[in-house]
Amino acid sequence: QVQLVESGGGLVQPGGSLRLSCAASGSIFSINDMGWYRQAPGKQRELVATITSRRRTKYADSVKDRFTISRDNAKNTVYLQMDSLKPEDTAVYYCNADVVTTLLRHFGVWGQGTLVTVSS
């Protein structure tokens, strides 16, 4: 069993910053890509940013130059530093990881989500 636990969401004013964390635990052999997605009320879930095991990154155009994704492979943790937040960034943010277990089985795992609200 593998699980992802997110933390760091909350309420922030426009222009402010938040840092999300997502830690993977369980029977992990390795983790390939990790990423963050978000779902705003009434909208589909969308990609925010991804990072490979070699730390190659990709961002949605809407968050480029404002958000930074990073990871600590030793801790099986991925981070999302969010700066210059806008009201339209309000959403539930989900962590995703492409995990290989100790039994060498391949799983795509999702976290439970953490709410980010950007409002004055």
Image: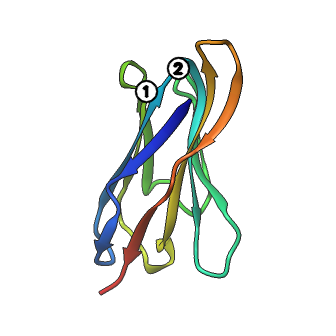
Vertical position of residue 89 compared to residue 105: above or below: below
Q: Which mark is residue 27?
A: none
Q: Residues within 10 Å of mark 1 (few under 14, many from 20)?
A: some
| Residue beneath disc 1 | 76
Vertical position of residue 55 compared to residue 120: above or below: above
Between 21 and 80, the residue placed more toward the observer is: 21
Q: Which mark is residue 28?
A: 2
Q: Splitting the image into 4 quarters, where does residue 98 fall?
A: top right
- Could you say where residue 118 lies in the image, as x and y percent from the top left? 38, 77
Q: Residues within 10 Å of mark 2 (few under 14, many from 20)?
A: some
Q: Quick one: quadrant of the C terminus?
A: bottom left
Q: Residue at x 69, y 31 (%)?
A: 107
> Do tag 1 and tag 2 residues touch (Cβ < 8 Å)?
yes
Vertical position of residue 42 compared to residue 24: above or below: below
Please, what is the three-letter code of the amino acid marked with disc 2?
Answer: Ile
- Could you say where residue 6 lies in the image, as x and y percent from the top left? 41, 49
67 vs 8, left or right, is right
